[in-house]
Image (cartoon, rainbow, N blue to C red):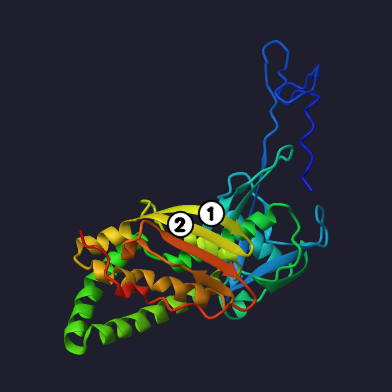
């Protein structure tokens, strides 16, 4: 429920003369005064405060939204730094100290004077993070991120979505480098290692050993992403997919279908394939990169199934990713299509 806009002044705040037509921006007509009154917005801050994957909420004991659950939040005092206000409100309402980690965004609505600024924060483990309801809260509690109660304000759903996206990004890309750069660093080590194994134990055993190891890592990454997002639906997985290309457009993706049960897209440009080709390892690109995709989706959700029949890495014009979400996914087809060497032009 938005707050009403401030009532325009009926008397000049400077000289006290009556304002003939009260309105925002009305100017005092008194000779020598000329003061203009403008309604200023109110700035409020809130914190999505997390401890061990659970979110701290307070049940409000005042209007608006009396009795409903919300993040610790409140108005910023004049001259107060936003982050300091966020920490203060959390301390006053929930009795804990919160570390401010990142800005999530700012929200405003037409006709509402309040601008809401949200942060993500972390509450310390142990007794120091045990909440105690302050004067402005009926009760305080931690909730599982995937099972939150109905929240007080319209923007709260968007704030939670921003928190999940930011938390998922921090889990999947913790280094200030693109995914392409990360794969390049890995390839500098893995390509010589695989070549050595090929010479010592044969191509088939070498590739099988590398594939098993890489898929195990990717499967665990999928589990970690699901835990970070607090969800295993296709909407959450689409957030992960959107981060694959990196800032430089390392993957060119054409989305064909996106709904709660399907995510279909084609990769029509792949700088990863170019990288392996330039390294003289075009035959290993599928093994070291593409073979992760099936395992990543399996780790993210038992019900997420990927169909893919071709890849640029293997010489096709595009990669066809077709994800579907079912309660129980069928056994995936073997992803070992990378044994056919792509052209090395």
**Location of residue 31 in the rendering, given as x and y in whole percent from the top left corner:** 70, 10
- Seen at 59% across and 74% down, the residue is 53
In the image, residue 190 sits, relative to residue 10, either above or below, namely: below
Q: Could you tell me which secondary element the residue under label 1 belongs to?
A: strand
Q: Which mark is residue 266?
A: 2
**Location of residue 274 in the rendering, given as x and y in whole percent from the top left corner:** 27, 58
**Taking 251 as reference, is 138 left or right?**
right
- Seen at 62% across and 62% down, the residue is 48
Residue 171 vs residue 327, the one in the foreground: 327
State the residue position of label 1: 256
Q: Split into 4 quadrants, where in the image is the C terminus?
A: bottom left
Residue 7 in which image quadrant? top right
Residue 183 visible to the viewer: yes
**Location of residue 344 in the rendering, given as x and y in whole percent from the top left corner:** 21, 62
Q: Which mark is residue 329?
A: none
Q: Report, in whole angstroms, how far the alpha carbon at label 2 lies from the one at label 1.
A: 7 Å
**Location of residue 30 in the rendering, given as x and y in whole percent from the top left corner:** 73, 13
In the image, residue 339 sits, relative to residue 321, either above or below, namely: below
Residue 23 vs residue 185, the one in the foreground: 185
User: Which of disc 1 and disc 2 is earlier in sequence?
Assistant: 1
**Taking 126 as reference, is 344 left or right?**
left
Q: Categorize mark 2 by other alpha carbons within 10 Å: few (<14), some (14-19), many (20+).
A: some
């Amino acid at each position: 429920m938005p707050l009403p806009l401030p009532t325009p002044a009926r008397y000049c705040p400077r000289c006290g003369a009556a304002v003939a037509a009260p309105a925002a921006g009305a100017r005092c007509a008194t000779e020598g005064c000329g003061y203009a009154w403008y309604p200023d917005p109110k700035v409020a801050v809130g914190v999505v405060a997390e401890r061990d994957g659970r979110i701290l909420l307070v049940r409000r004991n005042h209007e608006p939204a009396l009795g409903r659950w919300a993040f610790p939040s409140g108005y910023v005092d004049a001259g107060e730094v936003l982050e300091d206000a966020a920490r203060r409100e959390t301390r006053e309402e929930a009795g804990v100290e919160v570390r401010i980690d990142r800005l999530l965004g700012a929200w405003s609505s037409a006709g509402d004077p309040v601008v809401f600024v949200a942060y993500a924060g972390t509450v310390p483990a142990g007794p120091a993070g045990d909440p105690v309801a302050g004067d402005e809260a009926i009760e305080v509690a931690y909730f599982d991120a995937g099972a939150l109660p109905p929240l007080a304000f319209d923007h709260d759903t968007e704030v939670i979505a921003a928190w999940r996206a930011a938390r998922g990004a921090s889990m999947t890309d913790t280094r200030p480098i693109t995914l392409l750069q990360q794969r390049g660093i890995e390839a500098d080590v893995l390509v010589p290692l695989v070549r050595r194994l090929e010479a010592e134990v044969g191509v088939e055993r070498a590739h099988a050993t590398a594939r098993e190891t890489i898929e195990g890592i990717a499967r665990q990454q999928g589990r970690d992403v699901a835990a970070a997002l607090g969800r295993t639906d296709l909407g959450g997985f689409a957030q992960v997919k959107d981060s694959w290309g990196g800032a430089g457009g390392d993957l060119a993706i054409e989305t064909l279908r996106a709904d709660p049960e399907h995510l279909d897209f084609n990769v029509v440009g792949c700088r990863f394939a170019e990288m392996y080709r330039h390294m003289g390892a075009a035959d290993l690109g599928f093994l070291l990169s593409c073979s992760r995709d099936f395992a990543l989706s399996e780790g993210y959700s038992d019900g997420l199934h990927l169909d893919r029949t071709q890849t640029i890495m293997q010489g096709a014009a595009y990669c066809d990713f077709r994800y579907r979400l079912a309660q129980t996914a069928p056994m995936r087809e073997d992803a070992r299509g990378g044994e056919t060497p792509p052209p090395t032009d």
